[in-house]
Image: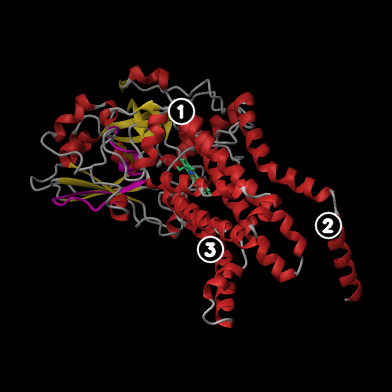
């Protein structure tokens, strides 16, 4: 047991101080995009059928789901930190969040370029008439202030409390993104349900932490709110 | 994202030589007892080529003008909505491979003078098979052009003689979760039910298909018998039909029951009436890069618009 612990500790300390880890994670995070691009290239050039008969829809779904997966990764960091007492993990919270935004942008671009065919009138009509598009747009827009204030300098400038409060917007993004997904599905809701359950656990963790904090300090709900674990 | 490694059709693998393909087919058809009825063309190029399409030996009675737009066999047989075999487009091709559409009987019942249980062979026997190249527009805003093989629905209706009180005809898919694994999950109410008004069913465009591309229907396309109504959204076509029932009441159809505000009984292709969640004005023709405008009644307005004169197509969607 003891040697096992030592071994664990040495792995953790290596990871913690590794200069390679950020690079490896960066490449891994780009892998889905490369994978998708590779399949598309193969289909176009070699006539394979990896993306099936409707590749544009397939890529739309592919990037939408990867956006959700990166949101999950990003929201997992805080609970994981608390459970493992590994504070350094927080470095990667921003990485995952930015990648979620990146994949959402690719998702939107595919939709705008290949589905709407750069037609602004159609795009506007879709946003106004299709609730799931409007909701997706809102989910994405709410990520923009978070991206713009994702630097350490921003945290310093805004102060922890204000920064934390702002970054709670990610919960709105997550909820809207799940609704968007749910609405875009025709009938078989098993997969959106699975995503919703995972997000439910991650949001539930925050709610529970907030609730406990509040219970400890009666009458100080709003202060506790500001202190609750953040995105 | 699903990576397809399975061949789109149990016998259409490029690894098999044409001869063995031929033998397999022959065996398959003989077992099916259909060889005498559906004297199928035996194309030697059953490979997956997108260029060389299997050819049909049957007369094309409608839609020859669409021949140059035919959607490739690979797409027709791997991009399917057939929830009885799973909800992903690629599921039916994968999960229906072991389905055996034989023996098969079709029951005609309800308000008809000649109700009967037909063996599939007897059901098809009286008709001369013809090819019809139809546009196929899915409610999800994609489309194909498909060369069906079969016979007019009107011919069957004449043969079984509905009684004067019959106003509708209902089509019912096989209900057998052992053979159709998708039915283990209640995504829709099983069995799948579709229906038409009797005058719609008598329209010369309404068609029973037993084949596609001059060959027997692949399982994933609704073997051994499906119906096709090209001016309506694809879900109006019932696959793997076991029952045809004549009634005086509007049938309670599967998608209409599932989401009545989204899927009406009529479900005529109409670019001006949107699905509540997406537009129906345009469609993506499978294989094309740009989207194209959706045509009223899917381009069949001349033949069918009169069926709906005086009706508000916004209400009767
Ligand atoms: C945070 C932002 C977003 C997330 C997490 C997200 C996620 C998703 C997911 C998971 C799907 C369904 C994938 C599937 O069915 O397998 C989807 C579909 C889709 N999304 Fe998004 N999305 C976002 C934003 C947007 C935006 C801004 C737009 C466009 C303005 C958009 C347009 C679409 C479209 C057109 C579909 C396809 C629906 C169909 O199947 O026809 N999404 N999205």
Q: Secondary structure at mark 3?
A: helix
Residue for badge 1:
A117
Q: Secondary structure at mark 2?
A: helix
- Closer to the N terminus: mark 3 or mark 1? 1
Q: Position of residue B272 (x, y in %)?
A: 26, 34
Relative to B56, say whether A52 is above or below: below
Q: Position of residue A52 (x, y in %)?
A: 54, 36
Q: Secondary structure at mark 1?
A: loop
- Closer to the N terminus: mark 2 or mark 3? 2
Residue for badge 3:
A197
Residue for badge 2:
A15
Q: Position of residue B116 (x, y in %)?
A: 23, 49
Specify the farthest residue to the left: B164
Q: Residue at x 53, y 43 (%)?
A: A61
| Magenta span of residues | B230-253
- Closer to the N terminus: mark 1 or mark 2? 2
Q: Residues within 10 Å of mark 2 (few under 14, many from 20)?
A: some
Q: Split into 4 quadrants, where in the image is the C terminus of chain A?
A: bottom right
Q: Nearer the viewer, mark 2 or mark 3?
A: 2
Is B237 covered by the magenta stretch?
A: yes
Q: Which mark is residue A12?
A: none
């Amino acid at each position: 047991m003891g040697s096992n612990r030592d071994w664990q500790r040495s792995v953790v300390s290596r990871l913690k101080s590794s200069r390679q880890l950020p690079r490896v994670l960066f490449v891994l995070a780009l892998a889905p995009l490369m994978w998708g691009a590779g399949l598309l290239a193969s289909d176009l050039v070699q006539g394979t059928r990896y993306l099936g008969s409707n590749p544009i829809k397939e890529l739309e779904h592919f990037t939408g789901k990867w956006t959700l997966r990166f949101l999950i990764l990003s929201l997992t960091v805080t609970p994981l930190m608390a459970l493992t007492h590994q504070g350094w993990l927080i470095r990667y919270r921003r990485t995952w969040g930015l990648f979620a935004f990146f994949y959402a942008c690719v998702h939107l671009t595919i939709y705008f370029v290949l589905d709407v065919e750069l037609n602004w009138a159609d795009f506007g009509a879709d946003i106004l008439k299709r609730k799931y598009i409007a909701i997706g747009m809102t989910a994405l827009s709410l990520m923009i202030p978070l991206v713009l204030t994702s630097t350490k300098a921003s945290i310093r400038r805004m102060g922890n409390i204000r920064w934390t409060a702002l970054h709670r917007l990610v919960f709105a993004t997550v909820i809207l993104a799940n609704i968007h997904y749910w609405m875009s599905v025709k009938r078989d809701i098993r997969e959106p349900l699975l995503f919703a359950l995972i997000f439910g656990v991650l949001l539930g963790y925050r709610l529970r932490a907030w609730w406990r904090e509040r219970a400890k300090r009666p009458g100080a709900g709003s202060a506790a709110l500001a202190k609750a674990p953040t995105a | 994202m699903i990576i397809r490694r399975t061949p789109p059709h149990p016998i259409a693998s490029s690894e098999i030589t044409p001869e063995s393909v031929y033998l397999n087919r022959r065996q398959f058809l003989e077992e099916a007892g259909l060889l005498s009825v559906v004297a199928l063309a035996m194309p030697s190029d059953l490979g997956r080529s997108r260029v060389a399409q299997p050819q049909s030996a049957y007369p094309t009675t409608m839609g020859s003008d669409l021949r140059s737009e035919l959607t490739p066999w690979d797409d027709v047989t791997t991009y399917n909505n057939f929830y009885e075999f799973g909800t992903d487009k690629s599921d039916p091709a994968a999960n229906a491979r072991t389905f055996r559409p034989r023996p098969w009987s079709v029951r005609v019942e309800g308000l008809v003078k000649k109700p009967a249980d037909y063996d599939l062979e007897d059901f098809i026997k009286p008709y001369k098979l013809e090819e019809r190249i139809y546009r196929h527009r899915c409610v999800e805003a994609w489309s194909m052009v498909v060369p069906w093989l079969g016979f007019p629905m009107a011919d069957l209706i004449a043969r079984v003689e509905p009684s004067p009180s019959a106003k509708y005809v209902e089509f019912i898919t096989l209900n057998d979760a052992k053979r159709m694994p998708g039915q283990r999950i209640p995504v829709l109410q099983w069995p799948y039910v579709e229906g038409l008004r009797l005058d719609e069913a008598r329209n010369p465009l309404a068609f029973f298909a037993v084949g596609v591309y001059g060959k027997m229907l692949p399982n994933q396309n609704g073997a051994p018998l499906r119906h096709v109504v090209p001016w309506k959204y694809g879900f109006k076509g019932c696959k793997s039909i076991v029952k045809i029932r004549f009634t005086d009441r509007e049938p309670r159809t599967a998608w209409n029951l599932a989401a009545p505000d989204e899927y009406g009984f009529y479900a005529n292709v109409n670019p001006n009436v949107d699905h509540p969640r997406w537009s129906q004005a345009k469609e993506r023709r499978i294989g094309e890069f740009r989207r194209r405008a959706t045509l009223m009644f899917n381009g069949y307005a001349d033949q069918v618009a009169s069926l709906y004169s005086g009706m508000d197509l916004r209400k009767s969607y």
